[in-house]
Image (spheres, rainbow, N blue to C red):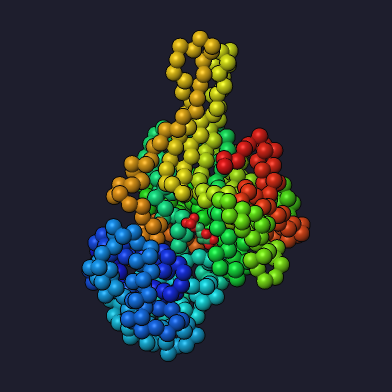
Amino acid sequence: MRRDASQKLLLFGATGDLSYRMLLPSLFGLASDGLLAPGLSIICTAHTDLSDGAFRGSVAESLRRTIPTDRMDGTSLQRFLDRLRYVRVDVSRPRDFADLAEAVGSTKGGLAIFLSMAPSLFQPTIQGLAAVGLGGDNVRIGLEKPLGYDLESSRSINDTVSGVFSEGRIFRVDHYLGKETVLNLLALRFANSLFEPLWNAGGIEHVQITVAETVGLEGRVGFYDAAGATRDMVQNHILQLLTLVAMEPPPHFDATAVRDEKVKVLRSLRRIDQTNVGALTVTGQYAAGAIDGHAVPAYADELVALSDTETFVAIKAHVDTWRWKGVPFYLRTGKRLPSRKSEISIQFRGVPHSIFGDVGAALRPNRLIISLQPNENVRLLLMTKDPGLDRDGIRLREVPLDIAIPNAFVDGRRRIAYERLLLDLIEGDQTLFVRRDEVEAQWRWIDGIRNGWKANAIRPRLYGAGTWGPSAAIALAERDGVTWHD
Ligand code: BG6
């Protein structure tokens, strides 16, 4: 535990889906592992009127559902519940903030605040906190996405927050940065001498980043329909993954050095606008289909009104730097795809000359596959010879070398990304949080694409649920002789 760790945590949106599914289970995990200071109290707030007892009851119920039984026992549950307090806050009522301040008490030992709420509530919440003295120098604030819906709205949120908190106390969450394999990518790149000499346009032919989900709207109709796949997934998670693949080696693993390098990548993304958006992007919306043998309805049937929102997007991106000259980054994400799969695939260039050509053996260029989901793993695909005396010619085979499993499971259990991020917020380490300049560079690039669609009246093409998106997305890569790694 760091010496400047906050002594109190204040959670807004505590009765929301994210809170019950991720935040509270993460805090429970940290508390059970002794990673939270014994005196750390967790003050939870939401709009709903609940007593401490009723809130604790609903937390207990949801933890029993989400935490594996071997990690759940009556004592740790009770100890965790004892840390929780509940205060009802309607952010439009100044009086509620006064009650909240009273419940929080002194912030001298440090207070970490986490806002898991609709962005439209950020402004009144931050103003309410400032008005009752909960924005002082020893207060940090974590903000869950979405941070706006375009560059302008994100600037306005950032202005509001920075009116009360300095940048060093603002923690913008992208939960992908808390995933174990994402950090393993950094270890792989910067703790090994093997890859770096090849990690450039000379050694890498292209990069693919896929975040595929089988789920549909999951009841988030209003939010998702207003956002769409590009803003929900590319603007944040996929672009953050891209920065980690493409960034220059930072001099240190600290918040300034890492984020300085990431923002350079974001600023080097080749602009996509109305002149090239048709050639470099494909959008789709799922029609009825089947996933794992179960029929699922079309996106349009899950809504009350017709919509042009994309539930799939594929983008061919470029990072215009010396290192990445001419290397395409194919990005894609979508709902209702055939499998849940998030991965980064690095396609290396082939050998310059095959000595095995005359003996009939085909070569495949090496590939590095960094899987985030469903399994956390890093695999390097290498060519090896099939065993035998080779009387009919040499046969070569692509075999995977698993290189990260042991590291990914050091303590025997898979941690939720939010465990790391909440701990970092409490302890004040910003390395895995998104800085203002990054978030704005992300929006600038996304706005170019979205404005391009609008100017060209590009609407999403239908794809059957349970397929890999519209066929045009396959063509986007195949035009370059590239096959998506499905
Ligand atoms: C969220 C998106 O940020 O990430 C969701 O709003 C998406 O639409 C989720 O389902 C995916 O996260 P994960 O960790 O399950 O890949």
Q: How many marks?
A: 0
Q: Residue at x 47, y 59 (%)?
A: 174
Q: Nearer the viewer, residue 152 or 352?
A: 352
Q: Nearer the viewer, residue 311 or 180?
A: 311
Quadrant of the rendering where the N terminus is positioned: bottom left
Quadrant of the rendering where the C terminus is positioned: top right
Farthest-out residue, top: 391
Q: Is residue 337 visible?
A: no
Query: With 42 as the anchor, is 462 left or right in this view?
Result: right
Measured from the top left, where is residue 196 in percent x and y? 45, 36
Q: Quadrant of residue 35?
A: bottom left
Measured from the top left, where is residue 352 in percent x and y? 56, 22
Q: Nearer the viewer, residue 308 or 272?
A: 308
Measured from the top left, where is residue 279 in percent x and y? 72, 47
Query: With 225 as the anchor, is 101 left or right in this view?
Result: left
Query: With 241 as the anchor, is 150 left or right in this view?
Result: right
Q: Quadrant of residue 334?
A: bottom right
Q: Is residue 224 visible?
A: yes
Q: Nearer the viewer, residue 45 or 115?
A: 45
Measured from the top left, where is residue 97 in percent x and y? 41, 85
Farthest-out residue, right: 456
Image vertical order of residue 167 relative to residue 70, above or below: below
Q: Residue at x 29, y 80 (%)?
A: 106
Q: Residue at x 40, y 40 (%)?
A: 188
Q: Residue at x 65, y 68 (%)?
A: 303
